[in-house]
Image (cartoon, rainbow, N blue to C red):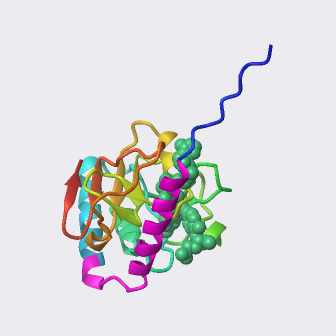
Amino acid sequence: MAAPHNPPPSDPPALVAAKADLRERLRALRAAPPSPAAIAALCRRMAAHVRAVLPPGADVAAVWPLPGEVDLRGLCAGLHEGGYGVLLPETPPRGLPLCFRRWRPDAEMRPGRFGTLYPDGAMARPDLVFVPLLGFDRRGFRLGYGGGYYDRTLAELPGVPAVGYGLSAQEVPAVPVGVYDVPLPVILTERDVILV
Ligand SMILES: Nc1nc2c(c(=O)[nH]1)N(C=O)[C@@H](CNc1ccc(C(=O)N[C@@H](CCC(=O)O)C(=O)O)cc1)CN2
Ligand SMILES: Nc1ncnc2c1ncn2[C@@H]1O[C@H](COP(=O)(O)OP(=O)(O)OP(=O)(O)O)[C@@H](O)[C@H]1O
């Protein structure tokens, strides 16, 4: 007899709709460019966090900015100068986890899915993953673009520290939580280190 087929669990429609609504509101927020001082403060905190938890030589996953996002290119250059490896994601088809490729200042950036750019370097496994947030709450729950990419990626990297980052304006009282959402243990903003 054939084994019973259990479809993977999925989020109820009301939750998917609540996430979509919140995403819409938070995207509107991104239309206003973040202040350079806030970005600089956030990037300083991110660099300090890396230095506190990892020795030089470790590989740190960041992202190359999408329009309206906090620009981490200065952080990438600073980490590289400080002796850290910098990895950036290549975005696969929906439903698959991200893979990370090594970036150096002279890397060629190639166009990827959804307007992303990824470096031409070799694939590598990160020792820490910075997770971009569209929105977040004090419990460590986050909302991204809705691809589920980071949820899937972090599920494949158990034990690798995941550090969310964003601007304090992106904080909301409570992000709607789905079956695959795992809270982040640390979220950095230009104002706060939120330890969950
Ligand atoms: N800078 C950056 N890189 C990243 C992410 C991110 O959040 N920020 N990702 C985080 O997972 C992954 C890419 N994930 C994405 C998933 C969906 C869409 C998306 O649906 N984009 C819409 C347009 C969005 C808009 O401009 O409002 C589209 O292309 O239709 C984009 C990125 C990996 N790289
Ligand atoms: N590990 C997983 N396995 C299977 N499905 C998953 C997994 N993680 C997330 N999903 C599904 O992916 C879809 C998008 O997830 P979600 O709305 O949480 O995206 P997001 O966190 O905003 O996006 P991203 O992680 O790309 O920034 C949802 O339908 C969710 O149930």
How many labels were placed on the picture? 0
**134 up-or-down from 57: above or below:** below
Q: Is residue 155 left or right of residue 36?
A: right
Q: Position of residue 187 (x, y in %)?
A: 29, 57
Magenta: main secondary structure equals helix
Residue 61 image point, x, y percent: 44, 56
**Residue drawn at x 36%, y 57% as measured from the top left:** 175
Residue 96, how many percent across, how many down? 63, 49
Residue 108 in view (yes/no): no
Residue 160 falls in which quadrant of the image?
top left
View extreme (top): residue: 1
Image location of residue 67, percent across then percent down: 50, 79
* Residue plotted at (23% across, 60% down): 48
The picture quadrant where one finds residue 70 is: bottom left
Task: Name the residue located 57 percent from the left edge and 38 percent from the top edge.
Answer: 9
Of 30 and 115, the residue lying toward us: 30
Q: Is residue 27 visible?
A: yes
Magenta stretch in the rendered image:
12-38
Q: Nearer the viewer, residue 106 or 172?
A: 172
Please give the name of the residue rendered at 30% of the width and 69% of the height, measured from the top-left corner: 43
Within the magenta stretch, is there residue 17? yes
Determine if the magenta segment contains residue 134: no
Report the residue that reaches farthest toward the right.
1
Q: Quadrant of the N terminus?
A: top right
The image shows residue 69, relative to residue 82, as above or below, that is below
Farthest residue toward the front? 14
- Judging depth in this view, the residue of 196 and 27 nearest the camera is 27
